[in-house]
Image (cartoon, rainbow, N blue to C red):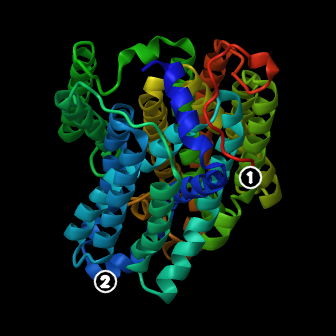
Amino acid sequence: MTDTQTVAAAGRETEKQPRSNRLVLFALMIAMMLAMLDNMIVGTAMPTIVGELGGTEHLSWVVTAYTLATAAATPIWGKLGDMYGRKGVFMSSIVLFLIGSALSGMAQDMGQLIGFRAVQGLGAGGLMVGVMAIIGDLIPPRERGRYQGMIAGVMALAMIGGPLVGGTITDNWGWRWSFYINLPLGVVALGLIAVVLRLPKKRAKAGIDYLGVVLLTVGITAIVLVTTWGGTEYAWTSAQIMELTGIGVAALVGFVFWQTRAAEPVVPLHIFRSRNFTLMTLIGFITGFVMFGATLYLPLYQQSVQGASATNSGLLLLPMLLAMLATSVLAGRITTSTGKYKAFPLVGSVLMGLGLYLLSTMDTGTSRVTSGVFMAIVGLGLGCLMQVTMLVAQNSVEMKDMGVASSSATLFRTLGSSFGVAIMGALFNNRVQDVMAERAGSLGSDVTEQSAQLDAASLAKLPEAAREAYQYAVSAGTHSAFLLGAGVAVVALVAAVFVKEVVLRGTGPDDEGSTPRPPTLDAV
């Protein structure tokens, strides 16, 4: 079936149910919320979970198992959707996520929780890419910006509300409900998708590329473990990290070689022949690198240097998150009305780099108002980039490759976040330890020997001189981390310069004779 026939078929399927379109959008937003909110809620509940289940030494694996499974499964879900139809595959990912959530809530020890979190992560890998790909199927290119702006709103809401919701649930219902809360939301999304979503059915003639799946999974797992363990669990030059790096590189090289020969490759390499697709995946990688690094180290600076509480430090991120939300919605509307988008990655990269540079100038005397302005500038840049990268990536491939394009863009952003947290974290930790040794001598080295990140209770127990030295050290550490982010943003700017603007297809008279538009969701 050609792209034109596919789009037209989708249109005939959904023309029968115009009133249900809002329900489809509502279900997609719930699924997106499940994927974004989970780690934020669980992170808040972790101290309580460890207190009941024990196994403090395995604490990091509760998050790592979920992240690994999500990253490894993302491209596979995208390919399965292209091969066998988006609806059934998306519903399967929701079911798997809910099974993992229920089992995690029933875990009796840390080992069980880690295993069940991996199951949950496998399902989560299909939630994000499923939403993006279904919107790509249902919405004509020019109008996708508006709906992907809504997705940015969900992401911002999850970042703001996740820790608050997690704390409230844990304090009032117990930590197990931080997992059980997914069940009613997921059932609603599953029921709506089953009843109201209509997409053309597909059936691939070729089978699943099992060797490609194995090679890609091994490669992604090894690389994520390197970025997670490097500098924390093991030294960067340790045998474990070197071995994992070698395994990851070998698996990914083998994967690329095999994809040129597989009958139905997991990630068809021809999509990277599109200059825009390749550039946008690179910009998406950098966006993930910057965003997750900033959201990790800004609260640490606010708590250690500016004296904010853990809850307030989350709320103090509002300038960045609200700016990101407002700009993303505005960018979506402008793209919808004009069909043009190149200005956004250009302006976004400049603002992101400028904001990060300004954040790198913060010291122990920087006020919350000043840091809030700097964060807002970063948020404006991220808002220009977050959804436009996905929009252009989807517009750069044929309809039959919508799933792998969406999953590849999502995967690169996920890997960017892993690298951002790891590399910015390594710079931060080294700088903090060096400054503490310089300003507080052997006491400073003892304070940061186990970790360069002290919680509020540990910080309060320090002698005044050591506490002041630590505040100065954190300021120096964030300077190095954010300065690196500003440098990385320059790479995004260079990539954005080479993006070729191809006016997006819309739905007006000027589009007569173009590919028939897919069914649209009603304006919300």
- Front one among 260 and 518: 518
Q: State the residue at coordinates (65%, 19%).
A: 496
Q: Quadrant of residue 33?
A: bottom right
Who comes first in sequence, dot 1 or dot 2? 2
Q: Is residue 341 left or right of residue 26?
A: right
Q: Secondary structure at mark 1?
A: loop
Residue 150, relative to residue 38: is it above or below?
above
Residue type indicated by callout 1: Val
- Front one among 430 and 352: 352
Q: State the residue at coordinates (50%, 22%).
A: 5
Residue 405 x %, y %: 46, 28
Residue 216 x %, y %: 26, 32
Q: State the residue at coordinates (35%, 47%).
A: 228
To which residue does mark 2 refer?
52
To which residue does mark 1 refer?
524
Number of numbered tags placed on the structure image: 2
Residue 392 x %, y %: 61, 25
Q: Is residue 354 left or right of residue 393?
A: right
Quadrant for the N terminus in the image: top left
Residue 370 x %, y %: 81, 53
